[in-house]
Image: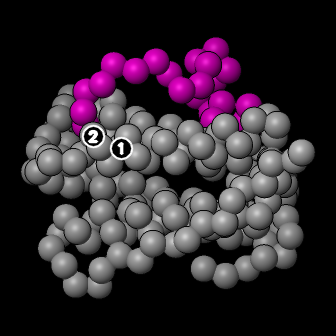
Amino acid sequence: MTWTAPDAIRTDGPLAANERVMLEGFLGWYRSTLLQKCAGLTGEQLAVASVPPSNLTLLGILRHMAKVERTWFRQRFAGEALDPMYEPTQGKDADFEVLESAKACDDYARLVEECRLADAAAAGASLDDTFTHGGEVYSLRLVYIHMIAEYARHIGHADLLRERVDGVTGA
């Protein structure tokens, strides 16, 4: 049986709330929007590079965002010592480029789990809590802002990719 990405309900964030609730809400909205962009597609469709000459795919974006969630929240902010998500010998862009449509279900589940673990890593922390990376000091606030920007950029890509795969459009 062919796996198909499940339906996704886009979570709405509050339009008026404190800063933490707003940042979490917008990040949740973008996370669910990416899943919504993939809903109803098979692993084969998710792996289609539908906007030539780019090799970008929806599956690559799912894999990349799982890596980014893990890197910023768990490794950098929480300081967890984790093995690389993708084989380092395959290059720094393996998340985008080394795809197996037959494993799309696993890649999808990995993103969902990394989002859950990212939320757990940030739970109870202050937006003002900091960590040092590459000699620079970063706050948890910056991590949320960075993640919202990262998702926003890739949701734009996902819009184009999805439309070319099966004609589906919309926010």
* Quadrant in which the C terminus is drawn: bottom right
Residue 26, percent across and down?
36, 69
Kindly indicate whether the residue at mark 2 contacts the one at mark 1 (C-beta within 8 angstroms): yes
Rendered view: 42 above or below 77: below
Residue 90 sits inside the magenta stretch: yes
Tell me if residue 53 can be seen. Answer: no
Residue 91, percent across and down?
63, 23
Left or right position of 162 against 109? right
Left or right position of 20 against 128? right
Q: Residue furthest bottom?
A: 15
Q: Residue 120 versus residue 147: which sits nearer the camera?
A: 120
Q: Residue furthest top?
A: 89
Under circle 2, the secondary element is helix
- Estimate how packed mark 2 is, as few (under 14), some (14 to 19) or many (20 or more) residues with alpha carbons within 10 Å: some
Give the total number of marks visible in the rendering: 2
Residue 143 sits inside the magenta stretch: no
Q: Which mark is residue 91?
A: none
Rendered view: 1 above or below 18: above
Q: Amino acid at mark 2?
A: Ala
Tell me if residue 122 can be seen. Answer: yes
* Quadrant in which the N terminus is drawn: top right
Q: Amino acid at mark 1?
A: Ala
Q: Circle 2 is placed at which residue position? A: 121
Q: Magenta span covers which residues? A: 77-99
Residue 21, percent across and down?
23, 68
Q: How is the image coloured?
A: one colour
Q: Residue at x 56, y 39 (%)?
A: 110
Rendered view: 86 above or below 117: above
Q: Circle 1 is placed at which residue position? A: 118
Rendering quarter of residue 132 = top left
